[in-house]
Image (cartoon, grey):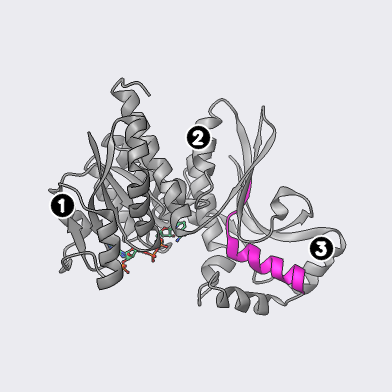
């Protein structure tokens, strides 16, 4: 049995997923009795489909060499080209668009509506239309998984949903934007004013030329909305998040915090009643006082008390590992549904 995968979006994450399919398909085959097989790849202007399977390494090499993956789309859309093509799972990894969720929203909706499973790292559709996507999945007997959309490689959603199934999670506090953390840390450690720390982050490639997505808390708010929906069963969107970014954090405020043995961090707080992203004072030594660009999640639970999950929030293979964990979860469910021994 094969699990036929189409990757939509063949940039950093898409190519990382192709690579991990090569590296991990044999192990998943021996664990679950099914073989992950790449049958389709799309980028913004070209595509390749082959029901007999594609060589993931060749697709990566082709993209690197030619800047495209196959024939031109010529005005056709991903849903149109996939309408009569057999596949099992769409890995949707096109750019996040927090305005209207496109093109990922249309891709995911088309796949789910035709009963295909979706695995994604794309925050936009989930932060804007989670309820609609979940409803489409339910109505059509499809599954949607999105571990990589929050925390990159840090397995917060699967840990919360699967491992803590008997626990009541009261709330989650998290640092989910490495760029903001880097800037706030540089301000404290080097005494740099905000603008200078931001310039440094841009020079090192942590922040975009237009940094507002990170520093105005948009990225963190999108992730908070996804967590609220996925873990607390809320029906909210990115627009429901109370959001304050770090533009207004002065060097003076950072120094005053340091004098009190505290740091300032951009913290996302999610619970059944709270949904907020804002700069907070955190005591030095507290898990949320984390430095560098790591992501961290602190869960407050009824039995286990406080626990933290930390890890990388981005990266080619790191993010692909989270996508792979979702693919493996789908394969495990298939295995159980078919009564095969694990
Ligand atoms: N990079 C990370 O570490 C990371 C971590 C967590 C989550 N994410 C999320 O994962 C997603 C992908 O990130 P990335 O870093 O891989 O982005 P990326 O490097 O910019 O790649 C995006 C890919 O999507 C393709 N694309 C754009 N519009 C398309 C369309 N209409 N149809 C088909 N393909 C289209 C692009 O095509 P071209 O190649 O032709 O431009 C490109 O191949 C984003 O939503 C991002 O927020 C990324």
Check disc 1: other Cα within 10 Å, few if <14, some if 14-19, many if 20+: some
At x 24% / y 41%, what residue is drawn? Answer: 88
Q: Earlier in the sequence, mark 1 or mark 2?
A: 1
Element type at mark 1: loop
Q: Residue 322 placed where, x, y %? A: 45, 47
At x 26% / y 36%, what residue is drawn? Answer: 140
Element type at mark 2: helix
Q: Classify residue 74 as left or right of residue 235.
A: left
> Looking at the picture, does residue 118 appear above or below residue 250?
above
Identify residue for label 2: 161
> Looking at the picture, does residue 202 appear above or below residue 40?
below
Q: Residue 119 placed where, x, y %? A: 36, 46
Give the quarter of the image for residue 258.
Answer: bottom right
Q: Nearer the viewer, residue 335 or 236?
A: 335
Check disc 3: other Cα within 10 Å, few if <14, some if 14-19, many if 20+: some
Q: Nearer the viewer, residue 35 or 113?
A: 35
Magenta-colored stretch includes residue 239: no
Label 1 – label 2 distance at C-alpha: 35 Å
Identify residue for label 1: 50
- The magenta region covers 173-190
> Looking at the picture, does residue 309 appear above or below residue 81?
above
Element type at mark 3: helix
Instruction: Mark yes or no: residue 245 visible.
Output: no
Q: Earlier in the sequence, mark 3 or mark 1?
A: 1
What secondary structure prevails in the magenta region?
Answer: helix
Label 2 – label 3 distance at C-alpha: 35 Å
Instruction: Mark yes or no: residue 107 visible.
Output: yes
Q: Tag on residue 257?
A: 3
């Amino acid at each position: 049995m094969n699990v036929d995968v189409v990757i939509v979006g063949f940039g950093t994450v898409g190519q990382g997923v192709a690579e991990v399919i090569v590296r991990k398909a044999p192990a998943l085959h021996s664990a679950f009795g099914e073989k992950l097989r790449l049958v389709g790849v799309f980028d913004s202007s070209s595509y390749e489909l082959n029901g007999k399977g594609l060589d993931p390494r060749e697709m990566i090499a082709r993209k690197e060499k030619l800047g495209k993956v196959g024939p031109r789309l010529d005005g056709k859309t991903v849903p149109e080209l996939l309408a009569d093509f057999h596949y099992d799972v769409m890995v949707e990894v096109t750019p996040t668009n927090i305005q209207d969720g496109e093109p990922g929203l249309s891709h995911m909706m088309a796949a789910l509506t035709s009963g295909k499973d979706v695995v994604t790292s794309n925050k936009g559709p989930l932060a804007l239309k989670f309820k609609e996507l979940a409803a489409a999945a339910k109505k059509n007997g499809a599954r949607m998984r999105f571990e990589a959309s929050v925390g990159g490689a840090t397995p917060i959603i699967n840990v919360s949903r699967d491992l803590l199934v008997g626990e009541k999670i009261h709330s989650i506090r998290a640092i989910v934007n490495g760029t903001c953390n880097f800037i706030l840390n540089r301000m404290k450690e080097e005494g740099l004013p905000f603008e200078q720390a931001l310039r440094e982050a841009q020079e090192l490639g942590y922040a975009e030329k237009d940094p507002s997505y990170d520093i105005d808390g948009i990225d963190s708010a999108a992730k908070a909305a996804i967590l609220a929906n996925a873990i607390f069963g809320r029906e909210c969107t990115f627009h429901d998040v109370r959001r304050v970014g770090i533009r207004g954090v002065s060097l003076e405020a950072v120094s005053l915090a340091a004098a009190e043995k505290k740091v300032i961090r951009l913290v996302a707080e999610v619970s059944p009643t709270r949904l907020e992203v804002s700069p907070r004072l955190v005591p030095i030594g507290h898990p949320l006082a984390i430095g560098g660009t790591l992501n961290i999640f602190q869960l407050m639970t009824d039995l286990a008390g406080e626990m933290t999950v930390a890890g990388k929030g981005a990266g080619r293979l790191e993010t692909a590992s989270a996508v792979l964990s979702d693919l493996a979860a789908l394969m495990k469910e298939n295995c159980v549904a078919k009564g095969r021994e694990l």
